[in-house]
Image (tube, rainbow, N blue to C red):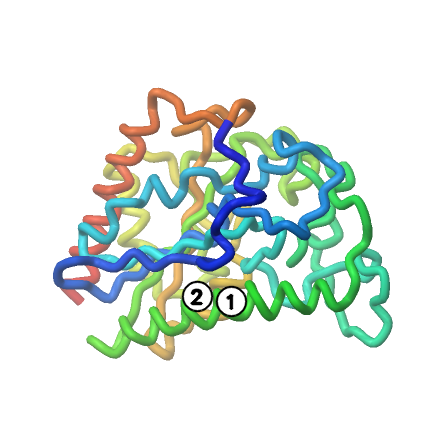
């Protein structure tokens, strides 16, 4: 299993931007869920081998060639279950807090499954995650320290890219379990394709960007679905603005292509999958550069 960085040294680096050394194109990649740092006030009642299943393990590594291809790669260092930047800041069930009075919360179906902006349930079966309810002040502190800075930094990267040509293109990178479990919104036991592309039903990017990504991945031999079972969440909702020149597309990669989902170790297929995804990024870079 990957090392548990719960006591790690990432406190001074909540996220990192890996910039191209050469000429950049207005294509930005972000990996919001591959972080492995669990701050010291994280208080789980489950062992790491349970709660770390929620990490999008190795996604930043799968796309690590992006800067060499001229595309910045932005990656969170903190764990998604501690503060999930792909959820709205009010996406939390009131019973997660010891003192929710006075707060206006809007829990989604995901939050009701225990995976809102702060997770309260443990995959794959939804067992309780936290040893205690959070104080309102703790919830607000996580938003201030993690959620808002992540979105501000991503917005800055996209604005920087857009300033070059008038448009920015954005790949929001994730991974998914090969088979749906009870904490997922698709039917338990459903098998997932190799990759799911999501554009919030045509609202977060132009159709040509989605079509280019779909064609590139199909040419590389991947089995692709679009907006099923994932449609895109808060990052696409907040940053995708095709009318304003920002095109955001979510990419979910099936973990069975590169890792053992029970031991969390890379499999013999990891390098081949990374190479195929590198070629995908190169194809998208060339497509963006030709716009």
Does label 2 or label 1 sit earlier along the sequence?
2
Above or below: residue 58 compared with residue 282 = above
Q: Residue at x 42, y 52 (%)?
A: 31
Q: Quadrant of residue 111?
A: bottom right
Say what secondary structure mark 2 lies in: loop
| Quarter-of-image position of residue 219 | top left
Query: Neighbour class for label 1 at 10 Å: few (<14), some, many (≥20)?
Result: some
Position in image of residue 211 (x %, y %): 31, 54
* Residue 285 left/right relative to 211: left
Residue at x 31% of width, y 32% of height: 273
Residue at the (27%, 46%) spot, across then down:
215
User: Could you tell me which residue is drawn at 78 percent across and 57 percent down?
Assistant: 134
Residue 290, horizontal then vertical, whole percent: 14, 63
Closest to the observer, 290 or 107: 107
Q: Which residue is mark 2?
A: 204
| Residue matched to label 1 | 237
Verify CB contact (< 8 Å) between mark 2 and mark 1. Answer: yes
């Amino acid at each position: 299993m990957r090392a548990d960085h719960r006591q790690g040294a990432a406190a001074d680096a909540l996220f990192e931007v890996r910039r191209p050394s050469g000429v950049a194109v207005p294509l930005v990649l972000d990996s919001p869920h591959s972080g492995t740092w669990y701050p010291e006030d994280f208080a789980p009642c489950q062992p790491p081998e349970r709660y770390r299943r929620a990490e999008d393990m190795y996604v930043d590594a799968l796309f690590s060639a992006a800067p060499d291809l001229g595309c910045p790669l932005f990656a969170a260092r903190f764990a998604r279950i501690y503060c999930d930047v792909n959820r709205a800041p009010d996406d939390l069930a009131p019973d997660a807090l010891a003192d929710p009075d006075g707060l206006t919360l809007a829990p989604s179906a995901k939050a009701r499954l225990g995976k809102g902006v702060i997770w309260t349930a443990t995959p794959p079966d939804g067992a309780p995650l936290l040893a205690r309810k959070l104080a309102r002040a703790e919830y607000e502190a996580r938003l201030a320290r993690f959620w808002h800075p992540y979105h501000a930094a991503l917005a800055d990267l996209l604005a920087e890219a857009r300033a070059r040509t008038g448009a920015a293109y954005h790949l929001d990178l994730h991974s998914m379990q090969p088979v749906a479990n009870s904490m997922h919104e698709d039917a338990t036991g459903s098998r997932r394709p190799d990759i799911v592309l999501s554009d919030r039903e045509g609202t977060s990017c132009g159709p040509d960007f989605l079509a280019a990504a779909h064609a590139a991945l199909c040419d590389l031999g991947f089995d692709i679905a679009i907006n099923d079972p994932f449609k895109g969440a808060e990052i696409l909702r907040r940053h995708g603005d095709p009318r304003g020149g920002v095109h955001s597309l979510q990419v979910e990669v099936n973990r069975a292509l590169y890792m053992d989902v029970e031991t969390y170790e890379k499999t013999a297929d990891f390098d081949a999958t990374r190479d195929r995804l590198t070629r995908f990024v190169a194809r998208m870079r060339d497509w963006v550069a030709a716009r």
